[in-house]
Image (tube, rainbow, N blue to C red):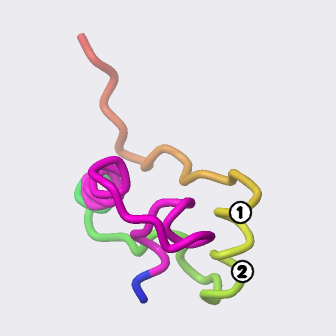
Amino acid sequence: MPLRWMAPESVRKMIFTPYSDVWSFGVVLWEIMSFGEQPYRGRPDMEVKKLLANNVRLSRPFYYFEPL
């Protein structure tokens, strides 16, 4: 399973909804804004699963653009 792109409810309870699709799309947008960096880079999948369960989210990409 692609844990790094899954919504927390999908990881915990295997619930897949349009909201979890939006979450995954947001992670893809994060990847684009970070120029292809892997989400939760350098962490094993089991640690990523624990981070999602504890509501730890991805930080802003380095090249984040503020809205005008």
Q: Is residue 28 left or right of residue 27?
A: left
Q: Secondary structure at mark 2?
A: helix
Q: Amino acid at mark 1?
A: Ala
Instruction: Give residue 25's position: percent from left, percent from top.
Output: 25, 55
Q: Amino acid at mark 2?
A: Glu
Q: Which residues are magenta?
A: 3-29
Residue found 62% across the figure and 70% down from its top? 12
Is residue 56 one of those drawn in magenta? no
Instruction: Give residue 31's position: percent from left, percent from top.
Output: 31, 62
Q: Quadrant of residue 49?
A: bottom right
Residue found 42% across the figure and 89% down from its top? 1
Mark 1 Cα-neighbour bin, 10 Å: few <14, some 14–19, many ≥20? some
Residue 47, which numbered label? 2
Q: Is residue 58 above or below residue 51?
A: above
Of marks 1 and 2, the one in the foreground: 1
Mark 2 Cα-neighbour bin, 10 Å: few <14, some 14–19, many ≥20? few
Q: Which residue corresponds to mark 1?
A: 53
Instruction: Give residue 53's position: percent from left, percent from top.
Output: 71, 63
The answer to which of 1 and 33 lies nearer the viewer is 1
Residue found 53% across the figure and 76% down from its top? 41
Labels 1 and 2: the sequence-earlier one:
2
Q: Is residue 2 above or below residue 28?
A: below
Instruction: Give residue 47's position: percent from left, percent from top.
Output: 71, 80
Is residue 11 one of those drawn in magenta? yes
Kindly report the secondary structure that dominates the magenta region of the rendered protein. helix
Work out how far the residue at label 1 is from the one at label 2, CA to CA, in angstroms: 10 Å
Residue found 26% across the figure and 63% down from its top? 35
The answer to which of 65 and 4 lies nearer the viewer is 4
